[in-house]
Image: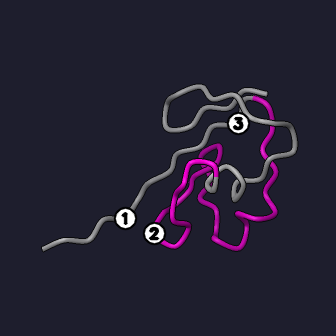
Amino acid sequence: MKITLNGEIKECAEGITVENLLDLCKLDKNRIAVELNAQILSRKEFSTQVLKEEDTLEVVTFVGGG
């Protein structure tokens, strides 16, 4: 199935969750925000939200510095 992740079309397995996708992308789930189809997800939704064909995700990584 195809989804859009940060503006790029990606091929994913059927039934993949947001958490699975983040793991595949090697993203630290504690330092990101995820928007799915213009709705911000809470961290507890990452493991239960199953992605569907043509979903659009925006993932923002928080970076500290000084």
Residues at circles 2 and 1 in contact by the CB criterion of under 8 Å: yes
Residue 37 percent coordinates (x, y)? 65, 43
Q: Mark 3 points at which residue?
A: 55
Label at residue 31 = 2
Q: Where is residue 60 in the image (x, y as percent from the top left)?
A: 44, 54
Marks 3 and 1, the one that precedes in the sequence: 3
Name the element at disc 3. loop
In the rendered view, does 9 fall on the left or right side of 47? Answer: left
Using the image, tell me which numbered label, if any, was put on residue 54: none
Bounds of the magenta segment: 24-53
What percent of the width, then of the height, locates residue 40?
59, 59
Dot label at residue 62: 1
Give the mark nearest the N terminus, 2 or 1: 2
Give 16 or 26, whichever is nearer the viewer.
26
In the image, residue 52 lies in the stretch drawn in magenta: yes
Residue at the (70%, 36%) spot, across then down: 55
Q: How far apart are marks 3 and 1 (CA)?
A: 23 Å
Magenta stretch: includes residue 57: no
The CA distance from mark 3 to mark 2 is: 22 Å
Crowding at dot 3, Cα within 10 Å, few <14 / some 14-19 / many 20+, comes out as some
Q: Quadrant of the C terminus?
A: bottom left
Q: Nearer the observer, disc 3 or disc 2?
A: 2
Q: In this view, does 50 lie to the left or right of 6?
A: right
Q: Residue, x 52% and y 73% (percent of image)?
A: 30
Q: What residue type is labelled 2?
A: Arg
* Residue positioned 79% across, 28% down in the render: 1
| The image quarter in which residue 11 lies | top right
